[in-house]
Amino acid sequence: MEQPASALARKNLSICVLDDDSNQVELSVELLEKAGFTAVGTTDPQEALRKIELGGCRVVLVDLKMPQMDGFAFLEKALQLDPGIYVILLTGFYSVDSAIEAIKLGAYDYLCKPLDFPRLAKTLDELAIAFSRRLEIRHLEDKLLENLQFHGIVGKSPAMVEVFELARKVARHFTNVLITGPTGAGKELVARALHQLSLVAAERFAVCNCSAIVDTLLESQLFGHVRGSFTGAIDTRAGLFEYANGGTVFLDEIGETSPGMQAKLLRLIQNREIQRVGSPEIKIINVRIIAATNRDLRSEVLARRFREDLFYRLSSIELRVPGLSERREDIPILVQHFLKKYGEAYGKQFKGLTRRAQIALLRHDWPGNVRELENVISGAAISAVGDFLDVSDLPAHLQKPARRGTTTPCDWRPQPLEEVRRNHIQRVLESCNGNRVRAAQMLGIGRTSLYRFLKRADNQAAAARAGH
C-alpha cells in the first residue's frame, strides 16, 4: 500500500483553488490546509493566473464551468505562463470524452464534484512526492555541476575528460601549447585553465586576438613601441610580452597572422628576446605562449600559408577541444550551468527546461558550439516569465528545426558519380572545419588518397575555368 507524502513534502506543495463559488473555495482551502498542504483560494481567474506567473503555486484546482473563463481556457493560459504548472480540472458533469480531452490539452487530472477528498489527496501526494524528489535531484545536480567544473569549463563527456587530463599534465611544464578546435568550443577557457594550473599562476595572463588587429598594430600590441615610431605613437609603451613577462600570453587565432608576424614570433620563441617597434634595444623575456586556432595548421603549412618551423615550435604539445556536436552528452549540464549563471544575472530562479525545450536543444547541430548555446540560454532567460524555459522562449530557428535527411522530388536531379563523390567529400571537409586528416578518417580513406583527389579536383576546376 502506498504511503502518503511526508508532512514536509505536503507543506512544500503550494496549491491554488479556483472556483466561482466562494463557499466551495473556502471549504476546499480549509480541507487542504488541515491535510498539511499550503493552499490559497480565489474566485477570479485573472488573480489565479497572476499567481502562476509569479510562481506563487505549483498546482491549481480549477472548476470546469465558470462564467468569466471556463476551465479549458484557463488551462491553456496557465500552461502558456508556466509549462511546468499542474492543473487539475473539477467538474460536476463527468464524461470519459471530456476527461480525455482535458488530459490531451495538458491537465494533470480530471475529477468529479462533489470532491472525493481521499482521491484528491492521493493525487496531490503523488505530486508532492514528485516535487520533493525533483528538489532533491536539483540539489544533487547542483553538487554534480560543481564537481564537473574544471576551472570554469563544464563537461563530463569522455572527449572533455581527456582534454582535462591532458591539461593537468601539460600545465605543470613551462612550455608552449597549441589549442585547436572549432570557433566557440572554449579554447580560451582551456588556455586560462592551463595558466591557473601552472607554476606561474600568480603571474599575468595576457590575451591577444590576432585576427582582430591589423598586422602593423598587432606588432605594436605584442612587442610594444617607442614614441614617434609611427603615426599616432605619442608615447612609449610596453607590449603584451613585456607586460606578461614571467607569465602567459594567449594568442588567439594564430592562423590569421601574416608571414612577417610569424617570423617575429618564431624569433621570440627561439631566442626569448623582443624589440619594441622603432627601438634598437633587445629585451630578454621569459613568457609562456599558448596559441589557439580553428584552422588546420598542418594544411596551412602544406599550402605555405603558415611557417612550418613556427608550427612545430608551437605544437610540441597540442590540445584539441571538441565541438559541441562531438560531445552532445554535455548539453544538459551546460544548459544547467548557463541557467544558473543567467538566472543569477537577471534576478530569476529557473527550475529547468520543459521537455519539449530540451528536445529542441538536443536536436540542434550547434555550429557555433558552446558560445552559441550560451547565447541561446542567455536570450531565453531574459524573455522567460515562468520557472521553466519553454520552446517559445528559444530563437525561431530552434522552435521549428529543419528536418534532417529529407528531400523532396524537386531537390533531386541525376548527377554523375564523380560529382556526387566530389560533393560528399566537400561536405565532410566542411563538417571537419577543413581538417583533412580528420576528413580522411571519416571517409575511411588514406590521407594521401584524399590529397590526390583534391589536387585532381582543383586541376579539373582550373581546366574548366580556362576553357570558358
Image (spheres, rainbow, N blue to C red):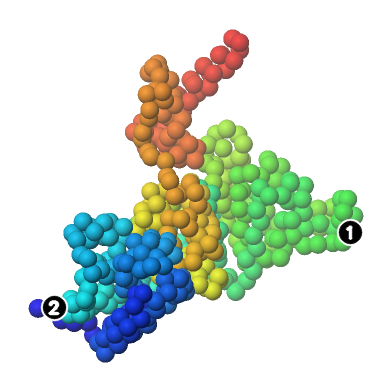
Q: Is residue 90 above or below residue 316?
A: below
For marks 2 and 1, the one nearer the N-term is 2
Residue type, numbered disc 1 = Ile
Residue identifier under label 2: 2
Which quadrant, please, contains the C terminus?
A: top right
Residue 295 vs residue 194, the one in the foreground: 295
On screen, residue 151 versus residue 73, left or right, reads right
Residue furthest toward the left?
1
Q: Residue at x 49, y 66 (%)?
A: 385
Which quadrant, please, contains the N terminus?
A: bottom left
On screen, residue 132 versus residue 462, left or right, reads left
Please tell me how many numbered marks the rendered image carries. Answer: 2
- Which disc, if any, is residue 411? none
Residue 438 vs residue 133, the one in the foreground: 133
Kindly check if marks 2 and 1 are in contact, taking CB atoms under 8 A apart as contact.
no
Q: Residue at x 46, y 55 (%)?
A: 392
Within-10-Å neighbours for mark 2: few <14, some 14–19, many 20+:
few
Q: Residue at x 31, y 73 (%)?
A: 61
- Which disc, if any, is residue 234? 1
Q: Residue at x 42, y 71 (%)?
A: 45
Mark 2: secondary structure: loop
Mark 1: secondary structure: loop
Q: Is residue 304 above or below residue 372?
A: above
Residue 402 x, y percent position in the rendering: 42, 41
Residue furthest toward the bottom?
34
Residue 328 x, y percent position in the rendering: 38, 53
Q: Is residue 453 visible?
A: yes
Give the CA separation, mark 2 to mark 1: 81 Å
Residue type, numbered disc 2 = Glu
